[in-house]
Amino acid sequence: MGNCKGNSKSLTQERKNIALSSNWMKESGYLDRFIFSQKLDINNFEKLQFFLVCNCIDLELLRPHSKTPSYDRFFIEKFQEKLKRQYLHRGLPISKVSEFLQCIFSIDPANTMIADIRDYSELVKTGHLNEEKPHFGRQNISSNFLNTKGITAMYNALYTLHNEFPDIVYCPVLPRIVQVLLWFIPSNKAVIIMKLLINESLSSEKNAKIFVYTSSNKIKILLKLALEQMKGNYDKKAYKKLAMQTINEFLIGVIQHEYVYLLMIAYCLFGLEFIAKFVGFLLKGCDNLTNPTAEDLAEVCRKNDMVNVIYRLQNPKDYNQSSVLSSMSDISDLCFAVNPKFSRPSRIFTTEDQKNILFSLLPKAYSHGNIIHAFSIEYDGLLINEFNKAWHEESCSSLLVIKNWDVILGIFFDRGLNLIENTITESECFIFKIISEAEIYHHHKGQELVYEFDSKNGIIIGNKNDVAFKLDLSMLDAKFMPSNVFRNSLMMGEQDFQVHKLELYLLK
């Protein structure tokens, strides 16, 4: 996609001097956000759009790279589901941000990555990794929160982009996104990512509605977005000043550093309006203060679940100013409309209605993934040992579905069975029943959930004193029983269940 191939060429000394002079920078209303086509062909996603949308909305995180150190690659492959759950609630560790950025933009990490990172920011120095409030170098907007080498790298990157895209000249979005990239990756890779973003924007520019800011109305529109939630009596001057300062500074020093990567992706998709809306959320949390400060906004961040806030503010339905929506305004609905795909046709879910019911039960993290066929009695026979082996073979979520006449029963495991040690007391596992509509029963927190394969009794799920599911050795008879593990009355009166069809799927 685009014209970007390989690393950018080094600037000559003469061009470096020109770049550092910054005389070439002239404000333009040409581009103030990265724009995308409103019409996405779901069967032919642009690679960049696909990764941005998936990571922004569903928050899918790391995937191992060919150059990822062997230990980290093993860790990521074996515990990917655990990592996802942890990062969804706790944010991404700073040590993983550089790999994350290169994953979503499909750029191989350099072997000298750590040395390069330290040239551009004090953010990842060992002494600051565990600080509650990160240190970003000089706290002055003119330095763009970069150290001296970082400032030089930023000017060089901007000048390189200026020469490649002369029509853009200069716009507010470029230095902000470049500076964030330079905290985590070297300048040549930051330029590659910027080229991808700009090429994507320009290629869809003719099909997208661009709202062009001018210097006179830009501040007015952003402040209106930031202050639209404020009601009652408040010091408008003080709140406007803090809002503009926070927008200009990209919330640095306000939002916890482990969530900066999510903020950056949302910014790529939705532009400065998203930042303004986010600042508005924080200001609303300070509406009882006469003269709020950046530290007060930071306290609001610490008290709230930033992942949920960022996710909620991405919803275009939350925007009242239709004129300032980016062309990505319909992307969340479109993304969720893309259902998982079966690796081969299911003999149980044969109608679109049945499939849609199933898809509605699955966690949103799987809304764009694949449902991989692992075992079925129709294809693989009544071989319970092979079935048990298939269920343990890979470290990923799984779905067991059984059908008897018009009733479909199933079990969802949110992790690979080979990762389960002893018992689970907290999970997103659930059992479900589908006839014309679905009934779903989630694993009750604190109740022990066990998977057990017994050579005499078959497969048991639940625990020894409270069995929720049992599949006998013949694989022809099953039992779904009322259980405190799932707090269900799922099979009251019809516990014995003759298996007509059985399918096991892995979710990726």
Image (tube, rainbow, N blue to C red):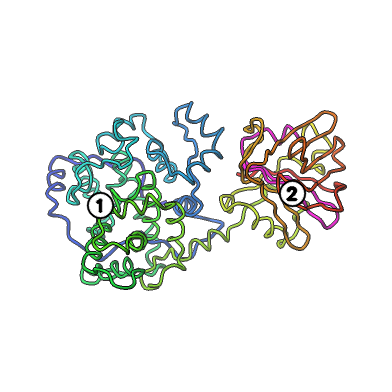
User: Residue 236 occupies which quadrant of the picture?
Assistant: bottom left
Taking the spot 67% from the left edge, 33% from the top edge, the residue there is: 393
Q: Nearer the viewer, residue 417 or 130?
A: 130
Examine the rendered structure and indicate whether residue 54 appears above or below residue 146: below
Mark 2 or mark 1, whichever is nearer to me:
2
- Which secondary structure, mark 2? strand
Examine the rendered structure and indicate whether residue 319 appears above or below residue 252: below
Is residue 82 rendered to the left or right of residue 1?
right
Residue 59 in view (yes/no): yes
Give yes or no for contact between labels 2 and 1 (Cβ–Cβ under 8 Å).
no
Taking the spot 72% from the left edge, 59% from the top edge, the residue there is: 438
User: Could you tell me the amino acid type at mark 1?
Assistant: Pro
Number of numbered labels in the structure image: 2
Magenta-drawn stretch contains 420: no
Estimate the spatial distance between the alpha carbons at disc 2 and disc 1, rounded to whole Å: 51 Å
Residue under pointer 1 = 175
Magenta span covers which residues?
Answer: 388-414
Q: Earlier in the sequence, mark 2 or mark 1?
A: 1
Q: Nearer the viewer, residue 404 or 119?
A: 404
